[in-house]
Image (spheres, rainbow, N blue to C red):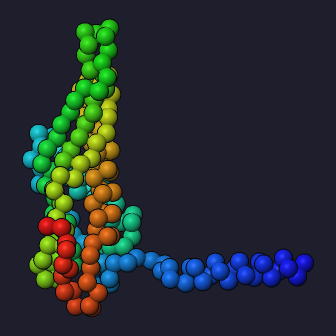
Amino acid sequence: MKSFLAAAALGASAFIAGCAGYRWGTSVPEEYRTVAVPVFENLTPVSELGPIVTQYTLREFQREGSFKLARPADAAIEVQGVLRRMDREGASYDRGIGMRATEYCYVVEADVTYVDKLNGKVLLERKGMRASTTFLTQNDLLTGQKNAAPRIAQDLALQIVNDAVALPFVRSGKGTGAVEGVQK
């Protein structure tokens, strides 16, 4: 019994020592915890896509919890997005109706820039961020594409927020901006 208690105590102390360097909460410095997301510029032929991606990005920032949403004038970080391209290709076909596509692959490409509003520097610029999904047409291509838009928006939003949490912040207390080696 004594050896079991000794082993349990040793295991517990090793576990606690291993967790000593772990921090609960966010790694985002306090001065950078406000974010603004203006409506994404939309260069695709799908007119409603810009506001949908913006809405899902705002929701994802709220869900993740490291940032508080703010107006652009009050934010420490501004996420600027441009939806560059939208592609839609047939993924599966029905031979019974003249090889008409019944399922499509839907891809959206975006450029996203994270701007440090405290000093005006670009923290990160991601070109060619891609999100994709598939959708069934059921003989109505536009409705299928419209129903797939929230899935595309959610995919992009997750990538955008994950990048924001991993930004290379300088911990000075005064917002000194981007660090060397940041992708531009």
Q: Kindly identify the residue that appears in the image at 19 percent across and 72 percent down.
A: 182
- State which quarter of the image contains the N terminus: bottom right
Residue 149, compared with residue 156, is above or below; it is above
Q: Foreground residue, 115 or 167? A: 167
* Residue 86 spot, x, y in % from top left: 17, 40
Tally of numbered tags: 0
Q: Kindly identify the residue that appears in the image at 32 percent across and 44 percent down.
A: 151
Left or right placement of residue 171 versus residue 14 in this view: left
Q: Is residue 64 visible?
A: yes
- State which quarter of the image contains the C terminus: bottom left
Q: Kindly identify the residue that appears in the image at 32 percent across and 34 percent down.
A: 134
Q: Foreground residue, 88 or 39? A: 88
Left or right placement of residue 49 versus residue 152 in this view: left
Q: Residue furthest bottom?
A: 173
Q: Foreground residue, 6 or 175? A: 6
Residue 22, compared with residue 162, is above or below; it is below
* Residue 18 spot, x, y in % from top left: 58, 79
Q: Kindly identify the residue that appears in the image at 39 percent across and 63 percent down.
A: 63
Q: Is residue 47 visible?
A: no
Residue 13, compared with residue 100, is above or below; it is below
- Which corner quadrant of the image does residue 19 belong to? bottom right
* Residue 2 spot, x, y in % from top left: 88, 82
